[in-house]
């Protein structure tokens, strides 16, 4: 990361405080984004300390909304970067199934922009699912090329 690597902390702390005050928050929970950014800034232990607060994303019987799916996608990418094998394995298959039926391609503007197949590849890799990870990364490369994005 370039620039002030602490700049996101205050902004996301305020976003989390706002999210926590709302009884039916219409915005995405910023915690998965904060986990991801902390890891990318080299703060793995701070990122890992957030995992207990993210346990609700593993309650798959809850109705999947686009917002919840987006948060889980960002969480999958974060777990992949952290190398959290067990948590990535718990999240991978339900997220893969949801993305296959939801027709969801890119995460929204409030989250980390990424191809969902890339996030799935990261989670599969962390979970030790090498063949699944390879398929997901190949799909992400194909999608990026279709969009004329840098690969």
Image (tube, rainbow, N blue to C red):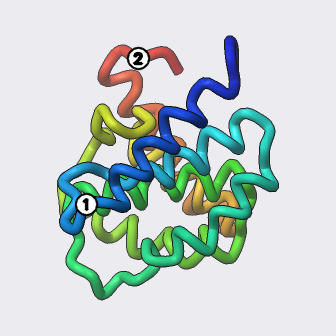
Q: Is residue 27 left or right of residue 11?
A: left
Label 1 residue SS: loop
Q: CA separation, marks 2 and 1?
A: 37 Å
| Sequence order check, earlier mark of 2 and 1 | 1
**Front residue of 111 and 52:** 52
Q: Residue furthest bottom?
A: 61
- Coordinates of residue 134 in the picture (x, y in percent): 59, 51
Q: In which quarter of the image is residue 69?
A: bottom left
Q: In this view, does 81 lie to the left or right of 151?
A: right
Residue identifier under label 2: 149
Q: Is residue 61 left or right of residue 26?
A: right
- Coordinates of residue 38 in the picture (x, y in percent): 68, 42
For the question of whether residue 134 can be seen, the reply is no
Which part of the image, by quadrant, shows the N terminus?
top right
Give the label, 2 or 1, closer to the camera: 1
**Residue at point 52%, 69% (across, down):** 54
**Residue at point 36%, 82% (across, down):** 60
């Amino acid at each position: 990361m370039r620039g002030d690597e602490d700049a996101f902390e205050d902004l996301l702390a305020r976003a989390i405080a706002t999210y926590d005050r709302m009884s039916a928050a219409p915005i995405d929970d910023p915690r998965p984004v904060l986990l991801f950014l902390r890891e990318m800034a080299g703060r793995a232990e701070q990122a890992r300390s957030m995992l207990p607060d993210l346990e609700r994303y593993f309650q798959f019987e809850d109705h999947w909304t686009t917002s919840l799916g987006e948060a889980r996608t960002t969480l999958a990418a974060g777990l992949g970067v952290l190398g959290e094998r067990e948590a990535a394995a718990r999240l991978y298959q339900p997220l893969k199934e949801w993305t296959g039926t939801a027709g969801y391609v890119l995460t929204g503007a409030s989250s980390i922009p990424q191809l969902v197949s890339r996030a799935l590849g990261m989670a599969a890799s962390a979970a030790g699912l090498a063949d699944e990870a390879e398929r997901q990364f190949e799909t992400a490369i194909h999608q990026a090329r279709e969009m004329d994005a840098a690969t």
